[in-house]
Image (cartoon, rainbow, N blue to C red):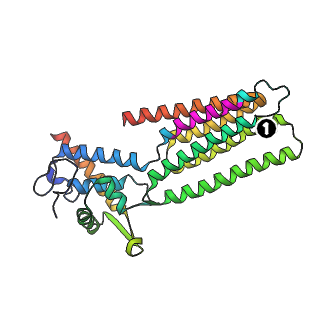
């Protein structure tokens, strides 16, 4: 066995041992690279999520802001919104798969559990929305306050669980803040709820991405 | 503290990179041989040789499942391995402080 095939680029003597300074640099660099490659890139996801929520909720808000009485988002706005939801889903899956490739154990098991809970919860959220419509609840609630707030309140809580399982405390706090912002957006009325949820969540997620960038640069 | 106090098993570029990479995993997680090889860019034979030394010392645990093309080797740092890496990093700091 020899170290001639080691491609780290650090000098070593015949036994393959290192100069302590080189060893320190190699240890730090390898740790940072491994963490970067194995962790979910939550900075990228926060940034992308912030843009998509802001644009998606913005499109819907534009379609409802002058409605008197409130009718709900136009089919075009809803269509665009779902395209954006699809984009963030595909991006999130791609980022997750990239980091978790070859990794098994507690983390992947937790991710499956949280994914299953999240998917079931979202289906339940929209089933209740259908039930509210069926029960004759006003459009202001069924197509305004409820869809503008509850899915993101729930999504924030699921996001917080996922972040906690990865010990990503910046994302954990941000996800809880998204939940709180969206819950308080319910007081903004049917049109205002879309605006407050969209802008508020985007600001929180941009803040999270900024903190992540700062942490990465100062690590 | 001198260079001689540094764990000779870890104080080798390839093995230091293997240990540092596996240490980035969450406790209870394993990494496949293929992904580790990609991450640290070593030849398969070279990686096997270094892993065997680390395994013999009780620093790394490997687990092979399946057979043929479906086989998968999972690797993880043992508690002893984590402690050894922590002790190595601490000793390295002391050596550098003395320079």
The image quadrant where one finds the C terminus of chain B is top left
Q: Nearer the viewer, residue A89 or A216?
A: A89
Chain letter for mark 1: A
- Residue A68 is situated, as x and y percent measured from the top left of the image, at 84, 25
Residue A134, placed above or below residue A3:
above
Left or right for B24, reference A46: left
Q: Secondary structure at mark 1?
A: helix
Q: How many marks?
A: 1
Residue B95 in sight: no
Q: Residues within 10 Å of mark 1 (few under 14, many from 20)?
A: many
Left or right for A94, reference A182: left
Location of residue A51 (image quadrant):
top right
Q: Is residue A153 magenta?
A: no
Residue sitting at the far top = A66
Residue A66 in sight: yes
Q: Residue at x 76, y 34 (%)?
A: A74
Left or right for B59, reference A80: left
Q: Which residue is mark 1?
A: A143
- Residue B33 is situated, as x and y percent measured from the top left of the image, at 35, 63
Residue sitting at the far bottom = B67
Q: Residue at x 33, y 47 (%)?
A: A31
- Residue A54 is situated, as x and y percent measured from the top left of the image, at 62, 31
Q: Nearer the viewer, residue A202 or B85?
A: A202
Residue A33, placed above or below residue A68:
below
Magenta residues, start to end: A45-60
Left or right for A64, reference A216: right
Give the main secondary structure of the magenta stretch: helix
Residue sitting at the far left = A14
Residue sitting at the far right = A136
Q: Residue at x 30, y 63 (%)?
A: B59
């Amino acid at each position: 066995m020899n170290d001639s095939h080691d491609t780290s680029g650090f000098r070593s003597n015949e036994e393959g041992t290192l100069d302590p300074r080189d060893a320190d640099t190699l240890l730090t660099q390898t740790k940072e690279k491994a963490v970067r490659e194995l962790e979910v890139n939550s900075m990228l996801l926060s940034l992308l999520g912030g843009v998509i929520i802001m644009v998606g909720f913005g499109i819907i808000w534009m379609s409802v802001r002058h409605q008197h009485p409130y009718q709900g988002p136009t089919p075009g706005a809803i269509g665009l919104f779902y395209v954006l939801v699809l984009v963030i889903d595909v991006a999130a899956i791609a980022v997750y798969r990239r980091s978790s490739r070859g990794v098994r154990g507690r983390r992947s098991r937790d991710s499956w559990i949280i994914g299953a809970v999240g998917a079931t919860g979202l289906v339940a959220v929209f089933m209740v929305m259908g039930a509210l419509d069926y029960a004759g609840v006003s459009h202001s609630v069924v197509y305004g306050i409820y869809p503008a707030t509850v899915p993101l309140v729930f999504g924030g809580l699921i996001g917080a669980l996922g972040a906690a399982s990865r010990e990503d405390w910046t994302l954990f706090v941000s996800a809880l803040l998204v939940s709180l912002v969206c819950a308080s957006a319910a007081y903004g009325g049917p049109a205002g709820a879309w605006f407050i949820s969209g802008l508020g969540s985007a600001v929180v997620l941009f803040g999270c991405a900024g903190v992540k960038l700062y942490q990465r640069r100062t690590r | 503290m001198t260079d001689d106090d540094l764990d000779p098993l870890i104080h080798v570029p390839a093995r230091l990179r293997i240990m540092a990479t596996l240490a980035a995993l969450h406790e209870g997680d394993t990494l496949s041989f293929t992904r580790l090889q990609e991450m640290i860019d070593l030849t398969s034979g070279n990686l096997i040789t270094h892993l065997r030394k680390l395994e013999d010392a009780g620093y790394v645990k490997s687990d092979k499942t399946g057979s043929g093309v479906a086989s998968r080797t999972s690797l993880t740092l043992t508690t002893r391995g984590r402690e050894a890496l922590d002790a190595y990093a601490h000793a390295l700091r002391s050596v550098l402080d003395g320079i």
